Amino acid sequence: ELCVGLHLGWTIAGAIGSDLKVDASFVSPHLRTSARLMRATATYGVPLLLSTAFLDLLCPKARERCRKIDTVRFVAQDGCSEPDTIFAFDINDSSHPTPPEHMVGEVVAPVEMPKEAIMDKGVEMMFVMDQDVVHAQDGI
């Protein structure tokens, strides 16, 4: 099962190890928030959770498709916590059969609109024209 927690924030990257072995490590309270969101997917029974900070980055069409799940407090190491509203982007992967010749992400333009015009409109148009995205939430 895939589980994803998406959050926005800074992180510090560094190398930890010895002369024989070096590993990359990342440290940040924001990284911990993302990990907590990822673990919370099992609690809420969804594969994808987003923080408010991440949701605010999404285009309006994407935000419309997100569902508020809960308001939580992730307690930091210093004991402080801020409430955060978490959201899910529900996907029904069995709702829309895909033809064998279909390429995921391929935009099929209607006759009255050239493909270039659609691509120029940016990611917002994907939620209208890309049938994989349009049908991802069928039946939910």
Image: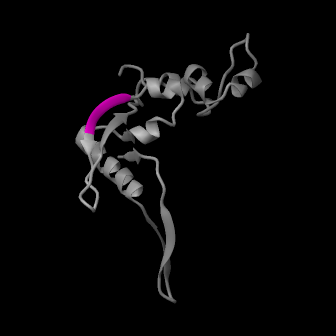
Span of residues in magenta: 67-71
Give the quarter of the image for residue 91: top left
**Residue closer to the observer: 64 or 78:** 78
Name the residue nearer the viewer: 72 or 20. Answer: 72
Q: Do we see residue 24 in this rendering?
A: yes
Q: Is residue 85 above or below residue 118?
A: below
Q: Nearer the viewer, residue 104 or 130?
A: 130
Is 89 situated left or right of 112 in this image? left
Looking at the picture, does residue 28 appear above or below residue 88?
A: below
In this rendering, position of residue 74 left or right of residue 127: left
Q: Residue at x 61, y 30 (%)?
A: 123
Give the tally of numbered discs: 0
Indicate the position of residue 55 as horizontal and vertical percent values.
45, 36
Q: Is residue 70 magenta?
A: yes
User: Which residue lies most toward the bottom here?
Assistant: 19
Secondary structure character of the magenta stretch overall: strand
On the rendered structure, is 9 left or right of 51? right
| Residue 50 drawn at (x, y percent) | 39, 40
The answer to whether residue 119 is above or below residue 11 is above
Q: Quadrant of the C terminus?
A: top left
Q: Please identify the quarter of the rendering in which residue 76 is found.
A: bottom left
| Residue 42: percent from left, percent from top | 26, 44
Residue positioned 42% across, 31% down in the render? 93
**Residue beneath the point at 38% across and 51% down:** 34
Q: Position of residue 63 (x, y in %)?
A: 46, 28
Seen in the picture, residue 33 relative to 115 is either above or below; the reply is: below
Residue 102 part of the magenta-drawn span: no
The colour style of the image is one colour
What residue lies at 26% left-to-right and 34% top-to-bottom? Answer: 70
